[in-house]
Image (spheres, grey):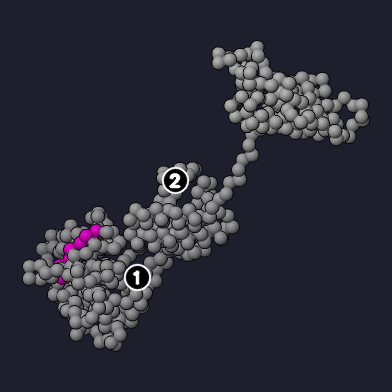
C-alpha cells in the first residue's frame, strides 16, 4: 500500500488518505457498491447503488444499473458472469469508482464539502466537447460546385463560381479568419463587402454577382447539407448598377464592313459582324459546326443550344450572314468560322474599330469613392465581342422586330430581359411616339446600311 492511496484489487472499496496530512489525521474516503434487494422491480431486478463515506459523511446514489440477485456477487461487489455483458458492466463500475476518487481529490485540493449533487455528477461526468474544426471556405465551396456539376449546370455557371470561390478565399487570407457559414453574420458580411469593393476593386455588378453566389452557397448548405446558417439570407443585399451597354449603329457596321484591314484582322472583323447579324454570344459562335447549319425555304438557318442558358434557338441567316459563312466554307476546319480565343478577339477588335474610324467619344460611366465617375472614351476602346449581341438586339428593335420574336432569337426566358438587354428602349419609344403623334416615318439615315443588308468586305 502506497502512502496516500490504497486501492483494493476489485471494486469492493477504494480508500484514499491525505498525503500531506499527519499520519493520524482522519481524512479518508471509502466507496462501496450495494445491490438494493428491497427495491426489486416487476422483472425481479434490483438497482445497484453506490455508497461513499467521506470523513464521517455518508452519501448514497443509484448507479443506473440493475440485475437479478443471482447475477450479483455481494462479496466482491460486482456482476457475475451470468449477467449479460458482465465484463462491460464491471468496467463501468470501476470507471465510476475512479471518477469518485478523482472528484474527492479535487474536493481536498479546493477545500470544498462533498454533496450528493457533486457525487452524481462525478459518477457520469459530461463528455468534453469535441473541438470544432472550421474548414476553409474553399473546401465547402468546391463541394457545392461538384454538386452543381452533378446536376448538369452549365460550364459557364461553374466557371463563374470558381471566380466567386477565389474571391471568398482571398477574403479569408486577407482577414486572417475563416469565412465560417456557421457563424456568418452581418458584421462579417460588411467586412466581406468592404474587401471586395475596396481591396479587390469589384464593380457594383461584380459585387452583386458575388453576393448572389454567396447566398446560393449558404442556401445549399442550409437546405441540403443541414448546416446551421444563423443569418437570414434575405438580409444579404447588393444592388446591381444600371450601366449603359455599347451598341453600334448601322453606319458603324457599314464602316466596319468596308474598312481596309491587315490580313490578320479580317477574320476577326467577319466573325464580329456575323455575331452582329445573328445575336450569337462568343461561346456559341466559337462552337458552330456544320451540324448547326440547315436549309429552310430557299435560305439557311442556324439551330443550336446556347451554352449559357441551355435554350434551343433557331436563327435565320440573312444574306450578309450567309455571305460570311460562304467566305470560309472552303477552309478545312471543324468549326464554321475562324474564331480566336476571346481575349485575342477583343484585343483585335479594338484595332479593327480604330482602323474603321470608330473613334467617336462614348460616355463611360463607373462608380468610385461613393459617387459616379463619367469619362469620354473612344468607342473603339470599348468594343468587345459582346458588343455584337447588344448591336443585334438594338438594331432589330429599331427596325421594327417584335420584342417577342427578338426574345426567341436571343433565347431569353423573360421578355423583360430582352428589353433591358437591348438597352435602347428610350430610342425605340422616341421613334414610336414620333411615328404615332407626328406621322413622320423614320429618316433615311436611320436605316442606311441596315444590319440585314450589310455585305462583308471580300
Secondary structure of residue under mark 2: loop
Q: Nearer the viewer, mark 2 or mark 1?
A: 2
Q: Specify whether 182 is left or right of 65.
A: left
Residue corresponding to mark 1? 363
Q: Position of residue 97 (x, y in %)?
A: 72, 29
Residue corresponding to mark 2? 225
Q: Quadrant of the C terminus?
A: bottom left
Secondary structure of residue under mark 1: strand
Is residue 316 rendered magenta in the image?
yes
Q: Nearer the viewer, residue 113 or 381?
A: 113
Image quarter for residue 419?
Answer: bottom left
- Looking at the magenta stretch, what is its main secondary structure? strand
> In the rendered image, is residue 258 in sight?
yes
- Which region shows up in magenta? 311-317
Q: Residue at x 55, y 50 (%)?
A: 134
Image quarter for residue 212?
Answer: bottom left
Q: Quadrant of the N terminus?
A: top right
Q: Nearer the viewer, residue 7 or 275?
A: 7
Residue at the left extreme of this rendering: 298
- Mark 1 crowd level (few <14, some 14–19, many ≥20, 10 Å Cα): few
Amino acid at each position: 500500500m502506497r502512502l496516500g492511496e490504497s486501492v483494493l484489487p476489485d471494486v469492493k472499496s477504494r480508500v484514499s488518505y491525505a498525503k500531506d496530512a499527519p499520519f493520524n489525521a482522519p481524512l479518508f474516503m471509502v466507496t462501496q457498491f450495494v445491490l438494493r434487494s428491497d427495491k426489486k422491480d416487476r422483472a425481479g431486478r434490483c438497482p445497484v447503488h453506490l455508497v461513499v463515506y467521506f470523513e464521517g459523511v455518508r452519501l448514497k446514489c443509484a448507479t443506473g444499473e440493475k440485475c437479478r440477485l443471482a447475477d450479483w456477487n455481494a462479496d466482491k461487489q460486482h456482476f457475475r458472469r451470468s449477467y449479460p455483458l458482465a465484463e462491460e458492466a464491471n468496467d463501468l463500475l470501476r470507471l465510476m469508482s475512479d471518477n469518485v476518487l478523482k472528484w474527492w481529490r479535487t474536493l481536498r485540493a479546493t477545500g470544498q464539502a462533498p454533496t450528493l449533487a457533486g457525487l452524481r455528477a462525478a459518477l457520469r461526468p459530461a463528455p468534453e466537447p469535441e473541438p470544432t474544426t472550421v474548414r476553409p471556405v474553399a473546401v465547402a465551396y468546391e463541394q457545392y460546385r461538384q454538386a452543381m456539376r452533378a446536376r448538369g449546370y452549365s460550364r459557364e455557371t461553374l466557371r463563374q463560381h470558381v471566380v466567386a470561390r477565389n474571391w471568398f478565399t482571398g477574403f479569408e487570407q486577407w482577414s486572417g479568419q475563416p469565412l465560417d457559414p456557421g457563424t456568418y453574420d452581418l458584421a462579417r458580411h460588411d467586412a466581406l463587402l468592404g474587401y471586395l469593393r475596396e481591396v479587390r476593386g469589384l464593380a457594383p455588378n461584380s459585387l452583386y454577382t458575388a453576393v448572389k453566389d454567396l447566398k446560393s452557397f449558404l442556401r445549399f448548405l442550409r437546405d441540403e447539407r443541414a448546416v446551421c446558417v444563423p443569418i437570414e439570407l434575405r438580409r444579404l443585399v447588393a444592388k446591381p448598377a444600371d450601366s449603359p451597354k455599347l451598341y453600334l449603329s448601322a453606319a458603324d457596321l457599314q464602316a466596319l464592313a468596308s474598312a481596309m484591314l491587315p490580313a490578320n484582322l479580317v477574320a476577326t472583323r467577319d466573325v464580329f459582324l456575323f455575331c452582329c447579324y445573328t445575336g450569337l454570344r462568343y461561346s456559341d459562335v466559337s462552337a458552330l459546326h456544320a451540324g448547326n447549319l440547315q436549309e429552310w425555304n430557299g435560305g439557311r438557318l442556324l439551330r443550336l443550344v446556347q451554352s449559357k442558358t441551355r435554350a434551343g434557338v433557331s436563327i435565320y441567316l440573312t444574306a450578309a450572314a450567309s455571305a460570311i459563312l460562304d467566305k470560309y466554307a472552303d477552309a478545312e476546319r471543324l468549326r464554321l468560322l475562324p474564331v480566336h480565343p476571346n481575349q485575342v478577339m477583343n484585343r483585335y477588335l479594338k484595332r479593327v474599330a480604330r482602323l474603321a474610324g470608330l473613334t467617336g467619344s462614348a460616355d463611360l460611366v463607373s462608380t468610385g469613392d461613393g459617387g459616379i465617375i463619367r469619362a469620354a472614351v473612344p468607342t473603339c476602346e470599348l468594343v468587345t465581342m459582346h458588343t455584337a449581341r447588344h448591336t443585334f438586339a438594338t438594331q432589330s428593335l429599331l427596325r421594327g422586330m417584335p420584342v417577342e420574336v427578338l426574345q426567341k432569337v436571343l433565347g431569353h426566358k423573360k421578355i423583360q430581359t430582352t428589353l433591358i438587354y437591348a438597352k435602347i428602349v428610350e430610342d425605340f419609344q422616341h421613334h414610336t411616339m414620333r411615328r404615332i403623334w407626328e406621322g413622320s416615318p423614320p429618316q433615311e439615315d436611320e436605316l442606311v446600311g441596315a444590319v440585314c443588308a450589310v455585305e462583308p468586305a471580300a
